[in-house]
């Protein structure tokens, strides 16, 4: 599993938490997002696309 996949899975786990827990973990969510940018030398637009995909999955699964 690539670093990118690991970070995306971690982000998915964080975003699947309840809204209250997500607020508590917002700093960790930001850290993971920044890791994606730094580790993979990708831009914020790409991270935005990843976040959109993650949010869409959870909305589709009604976990969000």
Image: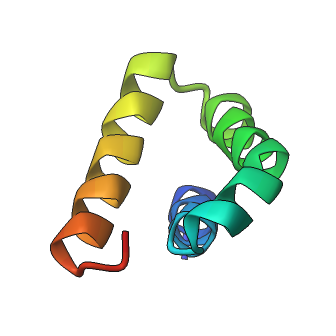
Q: Is 51 left or right of 60, judged from the image as shown? A: right
User: Where is 3 relative to 49, above or below?
Assistant: below
Percent position of residue 11, x then y: 58, 61
- Residue, far front: 20
Q: Is 32 left or right of 52, judged from the image as shown? A: right
User: Where is 37 relative to 59, above or below?
Assistant: above
Q: How many numbered badges does the structure rendering display?
A: 0
Using the image as rendered, state which of residue 34 and residue 61 is in the foreground.
61
Q: Is 59 left or right of 15, judged from the image as shown? A: left
* Quarter that holds the N terminus: bottom right
Tell me the colour scheme of the image: rainbow
Percent position of residue 41, x then y: 61, 26
- Residue, far left: 60
Percent position of residue 48, x then y: 40, 30
Percent position of residue 20, x then y: 68, 63
Name the residue at 55% across, 55% down: 4
Name the residue at 31% across, 70% down: 58
Q: Can see residue 25? A: no
Name the residue at 52% across, 26% down: 42
State which quadrant residue 45 falls in. Answer: top left
Name the residue at 72% across, 67% down: 21
Q: Can see residue 61? A: yes
């Amino acid at each position: 599993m690539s670093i990118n996949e690991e970070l995306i899975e971690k982000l998915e786990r964080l975003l699947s938490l309840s809204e209250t827990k997500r607020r508590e973990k917002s700093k960790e969510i930001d850290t993971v997002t920044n890791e994606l940018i730094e580790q993979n030398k990708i831009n914020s637009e790409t991270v935005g696309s990843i976040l959109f995909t993650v949010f869409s999955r959870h909305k589709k699964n009604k976990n969000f």
